[in-house]
Image (spheres, helix red, strand yellow):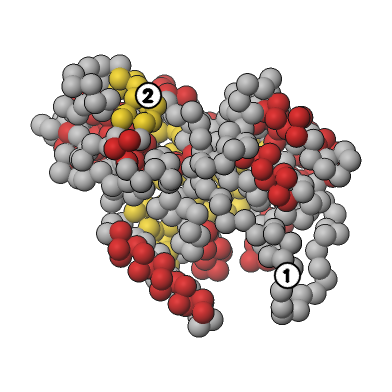
Amino acid sequence: MSTATPEGLWTSKNNWVPTVPGMQAGAPRALDFASPAPGDMVSLDTRSTHHKDGHGFFLPDAFRRDAGGQPSREVYRLNLAILEAAMTVDPALLDAAKSRRRVEPVDERAGGVDLDGDGVLARGVEVVRGLPTHYAGAAAKVKVRRDFYPRGVEFLHTVRYVDPDAPALLSARMKEVRYSRKDEEYAGDQVMAFYGAEQEKKMRNRLPAFPGTPELGLINEFGWRLQGFIEDAKGRLRVQTMEEHVFCMGCHTNLGVTVDQTFGFPRKVPGREGWRHQDLRGIADVPQAGHAKPEVLTYFERVKGGDEFRANEELLARFFADGKVDETSVRRASVGGDKDLAWLLTPSRERALALGRAYMALVREQGFTKGRDTLLAPPTNVLPSVENGSTGLEDAGLIFEDGRLHLAWE
């Protein structure tokens, strides 16, 4: 990994990341997306002291070369635009040929691909209509698959403290660094079989098992290899233990809401604005695909708070003054409002620092196997013990199965 400073690693010209040894210059790109799906990763959440941020995303070598095998940034932009369109199709749209995605300006002539379907190869194209059958340049033999990355895609992802004095709230100090790579690519029916096998394991009370080691990364059934680094007691990054790695594998293997086992890229901000280091400023609270109301507002209404414990007193005071969510105030961060997600989700300076100190205690204890959440006080909305039986949520109509990663940006 590069020895560049955390910010320098991501903020190179045009949001390319040229400082990772062994990779073609400019191969990784900083990725900006809406706040991770509401829950324990939202920065106002009681337990969260970090943003899920710092995504460096890059495609294999062939996607960065033209048909003659020469390095080409224009071909790479073209392939990134194609992938963006493939990974962000509305799940309710049965025919991907009817999809439309706004992308950064690309030169169709570089790869001979008519992305906007106007019958002319041009430069400065900002719309992908439908999906091409194949990628461009040296990757022209690789088929485009809706909702699937090509083999060899890599993510480098940093997790940081919230720094209330930093413009984008991103601390220079790393809590975690996570790396993932898609080593194998499977057909759609194979993927469905993997999910079926997982369900069978749960019914038989069999715990998931992952081949690999912490030093080489763990591998899931879907062909992804993941490896994580976390702070030691002195704040230096170390390789995670086997048990700590399994913590990461759960979300990137067994959750059906993911898109090819990932969270961030399908939520990318459309167009050129989405190729930058993550920054919630200027991003509106938009609905999830298939929903009518903005995403965070929907979460607040359903959870009746800003976190699953309903223990974030600061947020409750801001948006739940009478015990019910103040929809008018929350909608100020939606499209057409005068605020943004940064305003909606950013904790006060006092709260951010208090949560940081609480997490530091966890770091010094090295008790990550007990969880990575932080609380400023014991939660009061938690049962002291749980007996087998109904939770009562289904009877109360409080089980929701319509959650989507995809967002209705436009």
Q: Is residue 333 left or right of residue 69?
A: right
**Above or below: residue 238 compared with residue 140:** below
Query: Which residue occupies 48% across, 28% down?
Result: 410
Quadrant placement of the N terminus: top left
Q: Residue furthest right?
A: 322
Q: Is residue 46 left or right of residue 56?
A: right
Give coordinates of residue 20: x percent, y percent.
38, 38
Cα–Cα gap, marks 1 and 2: 47 Å
Between 176 and 153, the one lying in front of the other is 153
Q: Secondary structure at mark 1?
A: loop
Amino acid marked by disc 2: Glu
Give coordinates of residue 275: x percent, y percent.
44, 29
- Which disc is residue 104 wearing? 2
Amino acid marked by disc 1: Thr
Q: Residue furthest left?
A: 68
Would residue 49 be visible to someone looking at this image? no
- The residue identified by callout 1 is 391
Q: For the residue carrying disc 2, how many other residues have a C-alpha within 10 Å: few (<14), some (14-19), or many (20+)?
A: some
Q: For the residue carrying disc 1, how many other residues have a C-alpha within 10 Å: few (<14), some (14-19), or many (20+)?
A: few
Q: Secondary structure at mark 2?
A: strand
